[in-house]
Amino acid sequence: MAAKREEVAASSRKREFASRMDNWRRVVNSQTGSASSCCAAWAKWYVALRVSEGPPAKDVLDEKVKPLRGVVTADHLDGWMIEAAWRMLGDYNDRMALKAKYVFQFPDDRIRLQLKGVRGPHVKLVVARAEKRLQDLLITLESADTILS
């Protein structure tokens, strides 16, 4: 019974790590952090005033009832926390293995081309070692003592 619980806990940790790495990919690959479908409201208003029209009523209403947004979303904060931990990894192969696998989403044979001195089936070992080191760094970065200091 205890072994079953440990299996479930291990699989949930793997899923959580995979989702965090997917979030890291999205944060690192995003250019501005949020994609907007139209230009800034002040630019629309300026153009509207230039052509002798009032600002669109929808824009005025949106500005008045717009909810407050946080400076940084939790996903962006977590993505940059992973980025900071990734930068702290000392080994070049560890950093490149994680970047190639999770950011660029290369298959194993393509990851091997990014690594120095790694041949054949050793790519999976390098990736596993890098994941373990990154998880250890994240644990130390997220501890209360580190955050308070």
Image (cartoon, rainbow, N blue to C red):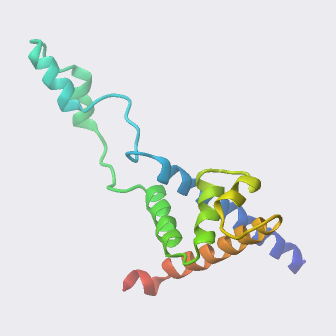
User: In the drawing, does residue 67 fall left or right of residue 19?
Assistant: left
Q: Residue 41 appears at what percent x and percent y? A: 22, 31
Residue at screen point 60% across, 73% down: 134
Q: Quadrant of the N terminus?
A: bottom right
In this view, the residue farthest toward the right is 1
User: In the drawing, does residue 78 fall left or right of residue 36?
Assistant: right
Q: Residue 111 appears at what percent x and percent y? A: 69, 57
Residue at screen point 76% across, 65% down: 123
In this view, the residue farthest toward the top is 52
Is 145 rendered above or below residue 92?
below
Residue at screen point 70% across, 75% down: 129
Between 90 and 117, the residue placed more toward the observer is: 117
Among the 4 quarters of the image, the one containing residue 18: bottom right
Among the 4 quarters of the image, the one containing residue 73: bottom left
Q: Quadrant of the C terminus?
A: bottom left
Between 133 and 79, the residue placed more toward the observer is: 133
Residue at screen point 49% across, 60% down: 79
Between 97 and 142, the residue placed more toward the observer is: 97
Is 31 rendered above or below residue 23?
above
Q: Residue 94 appears at what percent x and percent y? A: 62, 71
Is 97 rendered above or below residue 31?
below
